[in-house]
């Protein structure tokens, strides 16, 4: 089930951004390629600075949707490729609707859905860190 | 974390469609509520663990991946409308043995989670109708 979980580096970045939902697994920063499947939640006392809970991709995208109002759209593009878009809100209202802005589209087309998810998640983290 | 798992009826439908991936949790026909497994289980491996006939409860992302990989059915969830009261639609596209053309389905829902569930129900219906 490892492909359901966010890799170590983005998981650590999510912890730094305040992600604190209960998770099914966690990383020991000394062994970042190994997922420990035990319930865990940031910031538990026993988790030191290099350890972190690891969310599923679905949990991570919900965090950005609910906390930062960043909406993600991932779709099949054509044979063996995918793309993503990240939408956010701008304050300007036009006739009872709010203008959307596409913050980031896919610069290259990932070959798998999972690659598109990961590329999208890394971009979301970058957007929030640069706010 | 329970909202990460698909509901009882859809988990049962996926089992009948031969979903057999490892999962963290399951349902029993008797209680119809989520139960945690001590280890991950597939529908094959969990069958004889309890007299209550448990079956697995996939994560939404596991279920969607299974439809992509096994049935070449692709989905997207998209937000539209006013950011103060967003609406979510889903879209399913794919090719099946009995229907080589692309298929598109969409419904409007009030939350991302409602759209995900509606999308999952549609995916199950498509596969059942093409068996």
Image: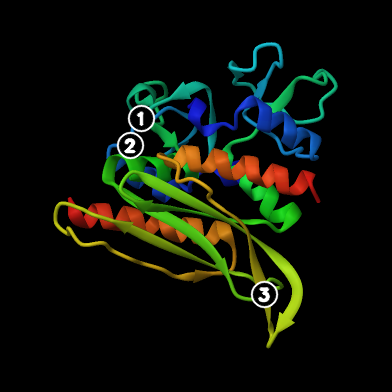
Q: Foreground residue, B127 or A31?
A: A31
Q: Secondary structure at mark 2?
A: loop
Residue for badge 3: A99
Q: Check the residue under mark 2 and report the chain it is in.
A: B
Q: Secondary structure at mark 1?
A: helix
Judge whether A89 appears above or below B42 on screen.
Answer: below
On screen, residue B128 versus residue B29, left or right, reads: left
On screen, residue B52 versus residue A4, left or right, reads: left
**Residue A63 visible to the viewer:** yes
Q: Position of residue B61 (x, y in %)?
A: 48, 42
Q: What residue do we see at 20% from left, 62% from top? A: B101
Q: Foreground residue, A119 or A49?
A: A119
Residue for badge 1: B43
Question: In this rendering, which labeled residue sits more in front, label 3 or label 2?
Answer: 3
**Residue B29 visible to the viewer:** no
Residue for badge 2: B19
Q: Are marks 3 and 2 on the same chain?
A: no
Q: Foreground residue, B102 or A22?
A: B102
Q: Residue furthest right?
A: A45
Q: Are marks 1 and 3 on the same chain?
A: no
Q: What residue do we see at 40% from left, 49% from top? A: B10
Q: What residue do we see at 33% from left, 43% from top? A: A80
Judge whether B7 appears above or below B29 on screen.
Answer: below
Neighbor class of circle 3 (other Cα within 10 Å; few <14, some 14-19, many 20+) is: some
Q: Gap in Å between the C-alphas at discs 1 and 2?
A: 7 Å
Q: Are the residues tagged 1 and 2 within 8 Å (C-beta)?
A: yes
Q: Check the residue under mark 1 and report the chain it is in.
A: B
Q: Gap in Å between the C-alphas at discs 3 and 2?
A: 41 Å
Q: Quadrant of the N terminus of chain B?
A: top right
Judge whether B45 appears above or below A31 on screen.
Answer: below
Q: Residue furthest front?
A: A107
Looking at marks 1 and 2 on the same chain, the residue that comes earlier in the sequence is marked by: 2
């Amino acid at each position: 089930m490892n492909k359901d979980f966010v890799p170590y580096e983005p998981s650590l970045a999510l912890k730094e951004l305040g992600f604190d939902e209960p998770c099914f697994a966690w990383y020991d920063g000394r062994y970042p390629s190994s997922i420990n499947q035990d319930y865990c939640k940031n910031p538990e006392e026993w988790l030191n600075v290099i350890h972190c809970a690891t969310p599923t991709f679905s949990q991570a995208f919900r965090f950005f949707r609910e906390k930062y109002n960043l909406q993600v759209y991932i779709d099949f593009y054509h044979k063996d490729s995918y793309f993503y878009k990240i939408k956010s809100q701008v304050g300007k209202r036009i006739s009872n609707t709010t203008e959307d802005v596409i913050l980031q589209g896919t610069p290259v087309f990932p070959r798998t859905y999972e690659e598109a998810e990961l590329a999208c998640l890394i971009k979301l983290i970058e957007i929030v860190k640069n706010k | 974390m329970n909202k990460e798992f698909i509901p009882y009826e859809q988990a049962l439908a996926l089992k009948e469609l031969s979903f057999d991936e490892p999962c963290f949790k399951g349902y029993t026909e008797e209680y119809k509520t989520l139960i945690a497994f001590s280890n991950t289980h597939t529908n094959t491996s969990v069958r004889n663990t309890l007299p209550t006939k448990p079956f697995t409860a996939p994560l939404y992302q596991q279920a969607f991946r299974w439809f992509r990989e096994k049935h070449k059915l692709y989905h997207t969830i998209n937000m539209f409308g006013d950011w103060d009261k967003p609406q979510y639609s889903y879209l399913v596209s794919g090719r099946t043995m009995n229907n080589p053309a692309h298929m598109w389905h969409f419904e409007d829902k009030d939350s991302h989670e409602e759209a995900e569930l509606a999308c999952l129900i549609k995916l199950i219906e498509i596969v059942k109708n093409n068996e």
